């Protein structure tokens, strides 16, 4: 991920009715990891649905992480 310039990711709940999202730093995952590899591991703390839509956050230096919202890696 970082070879493409990705420092952070935006994680969206897979339930379209929930619409919960969070910005996370991508440093915890290895360089060879694909975003699709981690999508099924997320669990929404709002609705409890497993799975997520993970997208690169190319504006990480501008937005930074969002505090107060939670996702757990299951």
Image: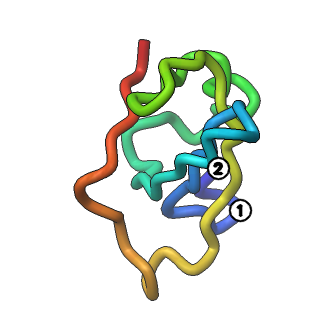
20 relative to 72, above or below: below
Question: Residue at label 1?
Answer: 4
Q: Quadrant of the C terminus?
A: top left
Q: Secondary structure at mark 2?
A: loop
- Tell whether 2 sits left or right of 22: right
Find out whether the residues at labels 1 and 2 contact each other: C-beta distance under 8 Å: yes
Identify the colour scheme used: rainbow
Q: How many marks?
A: 2
Q: Residue at x 53, y 24 (%)?
A: 42
Locate residue 42 relative to residue 70 in the image: left or right. Answer: right
The quarter of the picture where residue 45 lies is top left
Please name the residue shown 46% across and 58% down the image.
Answer: 23
Few, some or many residues within 10 Å of mark 2 (<14, 14–19, 20+): some
Q: Could you say which quadrant of the image residue 67 lies in?
A: bottom left
Q: In the figure, is residue 9 to the left or right of 23?
A: right
Query: Dividing the picture into quarters, in which one does residue 56 lie?
Result: bottom right
Q: Nearer the viewer, residue 18 or 8?
A: 18
Front position in the image: 32 or 17: 17
Image spot of residue 8 (x, y percent): 50, 60
Q: Which residue is mark 2?
A: 1
Residue 35 at x, y percent in the picture: 69, 37
Kindly give the residue lying farthest to the front in the view shown: 17
Instruction: Kindly report the distance in space between the C-alpha atoms of the residues bearing marks 1 and 2.
Output: 6 Å
Question: Could you say whether the residue bearing mark 1 is in a helix, strand or loop?
Answer: helix
In depth, the one of 47 and 29 nearer the eye is: 47
Look at the picture and state if 17 lies above or below 6. Answer: above
Disc 1 crowd, CA 10 A, few/some/many (<14, 14-19, 20+): few
Tell me residue 21's x, y (percent): 53, 51
Which residue occupies the foreground of this view, 64 or 66?
A: 66
């Amino acid at each position: 991920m970082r070879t493409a310039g990705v420092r952070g990711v935006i994680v969206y709940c897979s339930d379209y009715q929930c619409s919960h999202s969070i910005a996370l730093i991508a440093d915890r995952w290895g360089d060879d990891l694909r975003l699709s590899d981690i999508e099924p591991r997320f669990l929404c703390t709002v609705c409890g649905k497993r799975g997520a839509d993970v997208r690169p956050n190319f504006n990480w230096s501008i937005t930074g992480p969002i505090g107060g919202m939670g996702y757990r890696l299951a």
